[in-house]
């Protein structure tokens, strides 16, 4: 498989992805999928932008990471 | 409308909730791949995944996180949430097509903030599969509105 393996991944290296405009269609699909409640004023559900991160990562122009599993996310407020 | 939401002062430390179950389907994974743009073979290539440690396609980890956010709304009366401000999360096991997941949650922290109209609530959450295995767990920090003064 063509891809970036563990040995190929540099520590502390920053990549920037192309942009993605979040639309009301994204929000509607997400709310239908999750059954979260729509926010007042049509605000984007908080978890939705996080959901875009892995897909945006695929759009960086280099061989994709050969992922076995997603292990963890986040840090404290 | 205000009575439909629970304010910071209404939420008690130690409250526990359990959601109904939700069976994760192939459609959920297909929709999430389209929504997120994440077409990793883990989620989309049934043939490759037959040879993998999982033996079959698995749900995106972030799909599980997203579904549990919806399950939380079915587990308790809605909070008067202003913002989701923190997340510490572990993906402990795969969610496979046909798995039924549910959420267990517990309020483990309440903190006043410098702003008088809001406070911080920390909720510990566990996503369990049908046999009780924890597949995801972590803590979420929510900024909750305080009850408006008359």
Image: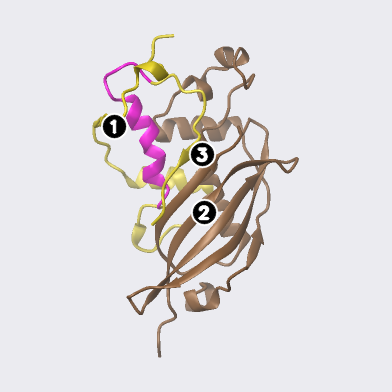
Chain colours: A yellow, B brown
Q: Position of residue B39 (x, y in %)?
A: 44, 24
Q: Are marks 3 and 2 in contact (CB under 8 Å)?
A: no
Secondary structure of the residue carrying tag 1 is: loop
Q: Residue sitting at 44 percent across and 57 percent down?
A: A38
Q: Chain of mark 1?
A: A
At which x and y percent is residue B25? Answer: 61, 34
- As drawn, the label of residue A12 is 1
Q: Hey, which quadrant is residue B56 in on the image?
A: top right
Q: Which mark, by number, is residue B138?
A: none
Q: Is residue B100 visible?
A: yes
The magenta stretch spans which residues? Answer: A46-64
Query: Where A44 sits versus B55, above or below?
Result: below
Residue named by callout 3: B63
Most extreme residue toward the right is B131
Residue at which label 2 appears: B139
Q: Quadrant of residue B47?
A: top right
In the rendered image, which quarter contains the C terminus of chain B?
bottom left
On the rendered structure, is A55 left or right of B48?
Answer: left
Q: Position of residue B105 (x, y in %)?
A: 61, 57
């Amino acid at each position: 498989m063509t891809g970036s393996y563990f040995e190929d991944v540099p520590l502390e290296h920053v990549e920037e992805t192309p942009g993605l405009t979040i639309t009301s269609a994204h929000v509607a699909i997400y709310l239908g999928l999750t059954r979260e409640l729509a926010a007042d004023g049509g605000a984007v559900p908080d978890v939705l932008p996080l959901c875009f991160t892995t897909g945006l990562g695929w759009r960086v122009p280099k061989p994709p990471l050969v992922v076995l599993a997603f292990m963890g996310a986040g840090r404290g407020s | 409308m205000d009575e439909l939401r629970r304010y910071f002062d209404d939420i008690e430390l130690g409250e526990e909730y359990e959601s109904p179950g939700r069976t994760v389907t192939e459609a959920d994974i297909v929709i999430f791949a389209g929504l997120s743009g994440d077409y990793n073979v883990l989620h989309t290539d049934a043939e490759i995944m037959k040879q993998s440690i999982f033996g079959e396609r698995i749900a995106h980890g972030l799909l599980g996180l997203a579904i549990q956010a919806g399950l939380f709304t079915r587990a308790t009366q809605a909070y008067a949430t202003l913002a989701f401000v923190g997340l510490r999360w572990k993906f402990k096991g795969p969610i496979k097509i046909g798995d039924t997941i549910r959420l267990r949650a517990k309020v483990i922290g309440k903190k006043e903030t410098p702003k008088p109209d809001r406070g911080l609530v920390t909720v510990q959450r566990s996503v369990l599969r049908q046999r009780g295995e924890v597949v995801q767990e972590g803590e979420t920090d929510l900024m909750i509105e305080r009850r408006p003064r008359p």
